[in-house]
Image (cartoon, grey):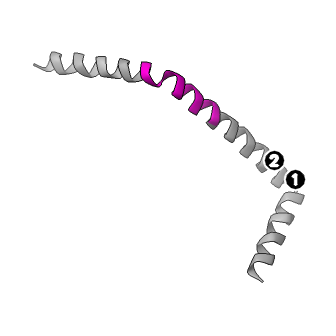
Amino acid sequence: MLLYQIVEYVRSFVRRETGQDLAEYALILALVAVAAIGVLGLLGTSINSILTNISHALTHAAH
C-alpha cells in the first residue's frame, strides 16, 4: 500500500508543471556536476601541484 502511494505521489508530481521544472533543474545540475568532476579529474594533478607549492612557500616563509 505504501509503495502505491509513493508511485501515485511521483506520478502527480511529474504531471504538474512545477515537477517538470524541477526535473529540468535536476538534469542541469547533474550535467554541471559531471562537467565539474571531469574538469577536476583533468586538472587535479595541476591543482595539487599548485597547492603543494603554496604550502611549501608558506612553510618556508614562516621559518
In the rendered image, residue 31, in percent from the top left (x then y), is placed at: 69, 36
At x 81%, y 47%, the residue is 21
36 magenta-colored = yes
In the rendered image, residue 52, in percent from the top left (x then y), is placed at: 30, 22
35 magenta-colored = yes
Magenta residues, start to end = 34-46
| Amino acid found under the numbered disc labelled 1 | Glu
Check whether the beta carbons of the residues at disc 1 and disc 2 lie within 8 A of each other. yes
Is label 2 in a helix, a strand or a loop? helix
At x 53%, y 23%, the residue is 42
In the figure, is residue 54 to the left or right of 61? Answer: right
Q: Residues within 10 Å of mark 1 (few under 14, many from 20)?
A: few
Seen from the viewer's position, the closer of residues 9 and 47 is: 47
| Amino acid found under the numbered disc labelled 2 | Asp
Up-down relation of residue 28 to residue 15 (above or below): above
At x 23%, y 16%, the residue is 57
| Residue 17: numbered disc | 1
Mark 2, residue position? 21
In the figure, is residue 1 to the left or right of 55? Answer: right
- Measured Cα–Cα span from mark 1 to mark 2: 6 Å
Up-down relation of residue 39 to residue 19 (above or below): above
Seen from the viewer's position, the closer of residues 48 and 21 is: 48
